[in-house]
């Protein structure tokens, strides 16, 4: 038989568990990328320090994620779980991208906004928090969302450091029973199940914020 | 160096401003008395905006010194020398100065109310209630009480500029800087904004530095007019002297060009 349905249903719970881990890892990594990227974008405006941070981020952005994962996992103490390393590396790697997104958003805020804030003597915390960032972030929500989808596509790379996630699961189960086609097809299907709704949500947000 | 006028609120002492090779203000000396309303006129590029931006600390002086209320402002004393003022030095002093911009520069992500209460709450330390009361009072002054919950994008240019004037006044500044505040407006909206400023001039003792091409308005509200050319004062006098009987050819020529442009 070309397709074994019985076997497919048998592995589905394991695959679903793997999917849950993947989604979890991605969301946590994304959270790191959102926060760290913003901090980097802000620090980049500080003279000397900003240039140094930029150089580091340029390096992070131009080396492959897989290499970074393997490298950090090899260096990390064994007490740190593979999943934690995976989430941290994913987050830091993508923060190099989100930082650029935030930066373009910040640069898109009119100079007059900074000047008005200064003319009112607003402290830096309010200038950033109440004036610049709300305007900057609103404009880059779609671009930030695209990186969430990109991260979902990259999470199978966590396999490389034996994170028990979706694709890793599929390979284990699939090769033992020689049902590789079923396992990978279901995995592909499950990935679509996650990334299509997230793409739709992002499209919605995009339209909503573009309208304002 | 000549001793600065002790009674002056604002004093420019040999102020030079350069952008690269371009000298915009050339050893400029002038002072403004407390409560005085001064209009700055002059051809494009003569340095009018730059003067206001130096006072608002949006630019730094290249040479010379600006004093406010008899105290160094562009610089501060440190170790027996004058060094460029840092943020800690400027913070309490800049609060006394407000500015209204040609392009309004309202915060589009905030309601009118928030635009007016943000700085009073977070800079002056007013309570929300106090700041709201002040905002409502000022919106009444500029005739926009019904727009308190609107967003700037829902307002006409003239309304936005009136909100911007209210926002600057909410800080209770001693000095108000106005840079061509009606230049970006459709002609039919200019009068409403000028009326608000006339009221402010009549009912307060705020010191005003005003760059404008509205000669009628300048004549009505200002005590003194400074005609700038190439970063220097070409002529100064009362509005009657400058507009009625200018001495300098440059002033005559400039006034003629402004009139020809339909102002
Ligand atoms: N940030 C800057 N960098 C370089 N040059 C500048 C800068 N700001 C102003 N300038 C130049 O300085 C000169 C004076 O500018 P300023 O804006 O003070 O003139 P102005 O009298 O206000 O003119 P206008 O009537 O056109 O507004 C102009 O030649 C202008 O191009
Ligand atoms: Mg100007």
Image: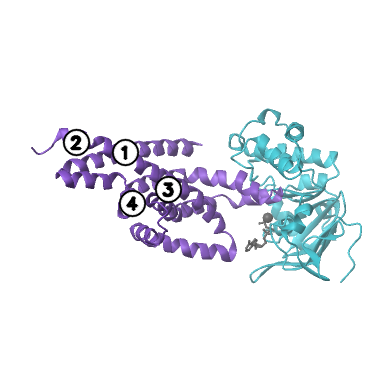
| Alpha carbons under labels 3 and 4: distance apart | 12 Å
Residue sitting nearer the eye, B11 or A107:
A107
Q: Which residue is mark 2?
A: A8
Say whether marks 1 and 4 touch (CB < 8 Å).
Answer: no
Which residue is at a point 59% across and 40% down the rendered structure image? B109
Q: Residue furthest left?
A: A1
Task: Indicate left or right for B101 with A136 as reference.
Answer: right
Could you tell me which quadrant the N terminus of chain B lies in?
A: bottom right
Does dot 1 land on a helix, a strand or a loop? helix
Which residue is at a point 39% across and 38% down the rendered structure image? A203
Instruction: Give the mark nearer the N terminus: 4 vs 2.
Output: 2
Q: Which residue is mark 1?
A: A17
Where A107 falls versus A173 (above or below)?
Answer: below
| Alpha carbons under labels 1 and 3: distance apart | 18 Å
Residue B80: percent from left, percent from top: 83, 71
Q: Which residue is mark 3?
A: A29
- Tell me the tag on residue A197: none
- The number of callouts visible is 4
Graded by Cα atoms within 10 Å as few (under 14), some (14 to 19) or many (20 or more), the crowding at tag 4 reads many
Instruction: Give the mark nearer the N terminus: 1 vs 4.
Output: 1
Instruction: Give the mark nearer the N terminus: 3 vs 4.
Output: 3
Does dot 3 land on a helix, a strand or a loop? helix
Chain containing the residue with disc 1: A
Q: Which residue is mark 4?
A: A158
Task: Indicate left or right for B42 with A98 as reference.
Answer: right
Residue B255: percent from left, percent from top: 74, 54
> Residue B152: which quarter of the image?
top right
Instruction: Give the mark nearer the N terminus: 2 vs 3.
Output: 2
Which residue is at a point 87% across and 54% down the rendered structure image? B33
Residue sitting nearer the eye, B37 or A211:
A211
CB at disc 3 and ligand 1 closer than 8 Å = no
């Amino acid at each position: 038989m070309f397709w074994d349905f019985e076997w497919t249903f048998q592995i589905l719970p394991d695959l679903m568990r793997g999917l849950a881990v993947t989604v979890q890892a991605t969301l946590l990594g994304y959270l790191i990328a959102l926060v760290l990227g913003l901090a980097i974008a802000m620090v980049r405006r500080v003279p000397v320090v900003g240039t140094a941070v930029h150089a580091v981020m340029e390096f992070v952005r131009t080396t492959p994620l897989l290499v970074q994962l393997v490298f950090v996992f090899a260096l990390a103490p064994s007490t740190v779980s593979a999943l934690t390393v995976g989430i941290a590396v994913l987050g830091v790697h993508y923060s190099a991208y989100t930082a650029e997104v935030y930066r373009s958003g910040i640069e898109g805020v009119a100079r007059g906004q900074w000047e008005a804030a200064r003319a009112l003597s607003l402290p830096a915390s309010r200038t950033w928090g109440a004036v610049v960032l709300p305007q900057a972030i609103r404009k880059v929500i779609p671009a930030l969302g695209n990186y969430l989808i990109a991260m979902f596509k990259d999470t199978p790379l966590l396999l490389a450091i034996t994170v028990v996630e979706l694709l890793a699961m599929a390979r284990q189960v699939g090769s033992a029973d020689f049902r590789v086609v079923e396992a990978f097809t279901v995995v592909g299907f499950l990935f679509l199940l996650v990334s299509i709704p997230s793409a739709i949500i992002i499209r919605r947000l995009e339209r909503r914020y573009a309208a304002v | 160096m000549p001793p600065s006028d002790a009674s002056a609120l604002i004093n420019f002492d040999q102020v030079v401003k350069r952008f690269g090779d371009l000298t915009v203000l050339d050893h400029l000396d002038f002072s403004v008395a407390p409560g005085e309303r001064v209009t700055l006129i002059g051809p494009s590029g003569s340095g009018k905006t730059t003067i206001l931006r130096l006072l608002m600390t949006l630019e730094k002086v290249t040479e010379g010194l600006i004093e406010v209320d008899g105290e160094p402002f562009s610089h501060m004393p440190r170790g027996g020398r004058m060094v460029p003022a840092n943020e800690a030095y400027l913070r309490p002093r800049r609060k006394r100065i407000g500015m209204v911009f040609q392009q309004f520069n309202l915060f589009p992500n905030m309601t009118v109310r928030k635009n007016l209460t943000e700085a009073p709450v977070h800079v002056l330390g007013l309570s929300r209630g106090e700041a709201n009361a002040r905002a409502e009072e000022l919106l009444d002054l500029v005739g926009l009480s019904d727009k308190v919950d609107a967003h700037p994008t829902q307002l006409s240019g003239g309304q936005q500029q009136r909100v911007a004037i209210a926002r600057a006044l909410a800080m209770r500044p001693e000095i108000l800087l106005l840079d061509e505040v009606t230049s970006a407006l459709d002609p039919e909206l200019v009068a409403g904004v000028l009326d608000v400023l006339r009221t402010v001039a009549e009912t307060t003792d705020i010191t005003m530095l005003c760059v404008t091409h509205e000669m009628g308005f300048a004549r009505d509200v200002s005590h003194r007019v400074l005609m700038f050319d190439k970063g220097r004062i070409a002529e100064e006098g009362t509005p009657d002297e400058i507009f009625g009987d200018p001495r300098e050819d440059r002033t005559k020529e400039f006034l003629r060009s402004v009139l020809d442009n339909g102002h």
